Image (cartoon, rainbow, N blue to C red):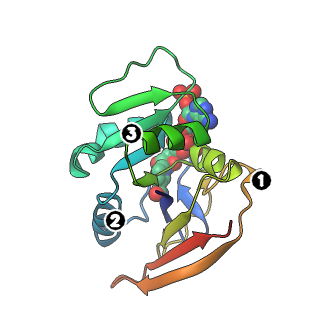
Amino acid sequence: MTVTIFMNMSADGFIAKNDDDVPFISDEEWDLYLQKVGKADALIVGRKTYELMKEAGDFEDLGNPRTVVMTNNESLKDEGNISFTHDTAASIVKALSTEGYKNIFVTGGAVTNSYFLKEKCVDSVVICISPYILGAGILFSADKDAEQQMTLAKHSVLDNGAILLEYNVKK
Ligand SMILES: NC(=O)c1ccc[n+]([C@@H]2O[C@H](COP(=O)([O-])OP(=O)(O)OC[C@H]3O[C@@H](n4cnc5c(N)ncnc54)[C@H](OP(=O)(O)O)[C@@H]3O)[C@@H](O)[C@H]2O)c1
């Protein structure tokens, strides 16, 4: 079983503007996101990212995969393939593994990424860096304790100059 964080990022290290806009993600980069994340058999997202993805119709574009949403709001009710939890990152991964899921993607946002990194639950990190300076916004991770050493496994350049970096996390 592998747990992969996949994020699109501006060249200056932000995953979104403070108003949640992501103008740096080109159509080509979005197609790559759908291609890569579409291969996941389960997704884990934070509640804020869940709401943004739901509103944009992203779950349909990804084939409505099994999705776990992290939240402290106990009034949110499971619905179809989507469940809500305030379990730890390690417990979520263990539960998905018991359910038989092998290729698990964490797709943000910053708060959620930091929980998975802090709990050492991440095997690989994929970052698509856009040729775009955002100036200010939301960083990849929301916590200084999410520090993690990695090794570069693969890299490639998209036609628009975005760079895809695929890392293995050092255990
Ligand atoms: N560039 C990219 O690839 C990319 C990808 C995804 C998201 N984004 C951007 O990231 C931003 C959202 O990131 P964010 O960091 O603000 O929010 P987030 O991680 O998406 O969601 C945060 C919320 O998730 C819940 N949560 C997270 N960890 C939890 C834990 N350990 N236990 C219980 N609940 C937990 C809490 O929900 P409750 O408040 O309900 O308790 C928390 O308020 C948006 O702007 C979005 O556009 C960018």
**Residue 20 shows in the view:** no
Which image quarter: residue 30? Answer: bottom left
The residue lying at 26 percent from left, 28 percent from top is 80
Q: CA distance from mark 2 to mark 3?
A: 22 Å
Q: Are marks 2 and 1 in contact (CB under 8 Å)?
A: no
Q: Is mark 3 within 8 Å of ligand 1?
A: no
Image spot of residue 130 (x, y percent): 46, 73
* Label 1 SS: helix
- Separation (CA) of disc 2 from disc 1: 28 Å
For residue 36, the mark is 2
Amino acid under label 2? Lys
Vertical relation: 162 (above or below) 26: below
Amino acid beneath label 1: Lys
Q: Residue at x 50, y 28 (%)?
A: 85
Q: From the viewer's perspective, is residue 87 above or below residue 3?
A: above
Name which of mark 2 and mark 3 comes first in the sequence: 2
Question: Rounded to the nearest whole Å, what is the CA distance between mark 1 and mark 3?
Answer: 32 Å
Mark 3 residue crowding within 10 angstroms, few (<14) / some (14–19) / many (20+)? few
Mark 2 or 3, closer to the camera = 3
Q: Position of residue 73 (x, y in %)?
A: 53, 20
Circle 2: element type? helix
Q: Which quadrant of the figure has residue 158? A: bottom left
Residue 101 at what x, y percent from top left?
38, 48
Find numbered disc 3 in the image and state the secondary structure of the residue it sits on.
Answer: loop
Residue bearing the label numbered 3: 99
Sort mark 2 into few (<14), some (14-19) or many (20+) by Cα contacts within 10 Å.
some
Report whether 156 appears left or right of 12.
Answer: left
Mark found first going from the N terminus, 2 or 1 = 2
